[in-house]
């Protein structure tokens, strides 16, 4: 991560560039396949895109599942390198526990990977762009911002 993007020791959210947005794995997949719908493309215009460690993990799952050749893996890694990355740290872990616990308490449990993506967003106070809004809506009442 560039020096300007590191988290200070005080556990404050990192200072994001102007107009950041976290892309859910579904949006990244559509971008990769060059089939992003216009409304999602327009929501990204003028924004700095971030991806989470979950998107990278799901990329690797796809690599192993589909038995990609090394050249295809290299192409995918180069393509993913264009995005700023959000990793898992103590703040994200606490947010995952908070979001997971609150949505379960509310009667709307969220799948673990969706909760991790949301935790990256809320820990860093960044909005999320997803095509699967319904999966993330239970976390809007707990600080998640959906575009």
Image (tube, helix red, strand yellow):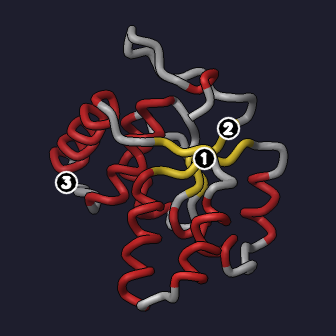
Q: Position of residue 42 (x, y in %)?
A: 81, 58
Of labels 2 and 3, earlier in sequence is 2
Which numbered disc covers residue 20? Answer: 2
**Residue 29, quarter of the rendered image:** bottom right
Within 10 Å of disc 3 (Cα), the crowding (few <14, some 14-19, many 20+) is few
Q: State yes or no: discs 2 and 3 in contact (Cβ < 8 Å).
A: no
**Cα gap from disc 2 to disc 3, whole angstroms:** 31 Å
Q: Work out whether mark 1 precedes mark 3 in sequence or the reverse, and give the earlier one.
A: 1
Q: CA distance from mark 2 to mark 1?
A: 7 Å
Q: Secondary structure at mark 2?
A: strand
Of residues 82 and 127, the one drawn nearer to the viewer in this rendering: 82
- Residue at (75%, 73%) from the top-left corner? 37
| Image: 3 above or below 27 | above
For disc 3, the marked residue is 107
Which image quarter holds the N terminus?
Answer: top right
- Could you say which quadrant of the image residue 85 lies in? top right
Q: Is residue 30 left or right of residue 64?
A: right
The disc placed on residue 50 is: 1
Q: Position of residue 144 (x, y in %)?
A: 46, 40
Q: Residue at x 41, y 69 (%)?
A: 58
């Amino acid at each position: 991560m560039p020096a300007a993007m590191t988290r200070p020791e005080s556990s404050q959210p990192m200072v994001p560039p102007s107009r950041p947005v976290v892309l859910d794995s579904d949006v990244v997949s559509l971008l990769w396949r060059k089939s992003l719908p216009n409304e999602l493309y327009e929501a990204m215009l003028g924004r700095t895109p971030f991806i989470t460690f979950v998107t990278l993990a799901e990329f690797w799952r796809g690599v192993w599942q589909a038995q990609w050749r090394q050249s295809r893996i290299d192409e995918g890694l180069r393509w993913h390198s264009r995005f700023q990355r959000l990793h898992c740290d103590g703040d994200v872990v606490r947010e995952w526990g908070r979001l997971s616990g609150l949505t379960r308490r509310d009667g709307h449990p969220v799948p673990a990977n969706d909760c991790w993506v949301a935790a990256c967003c809320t820990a860093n106070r960044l909005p999320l762009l997803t095509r699967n809004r319904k999966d993330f809506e239970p976390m809007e009442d707990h600080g998640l911002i959906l575009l």
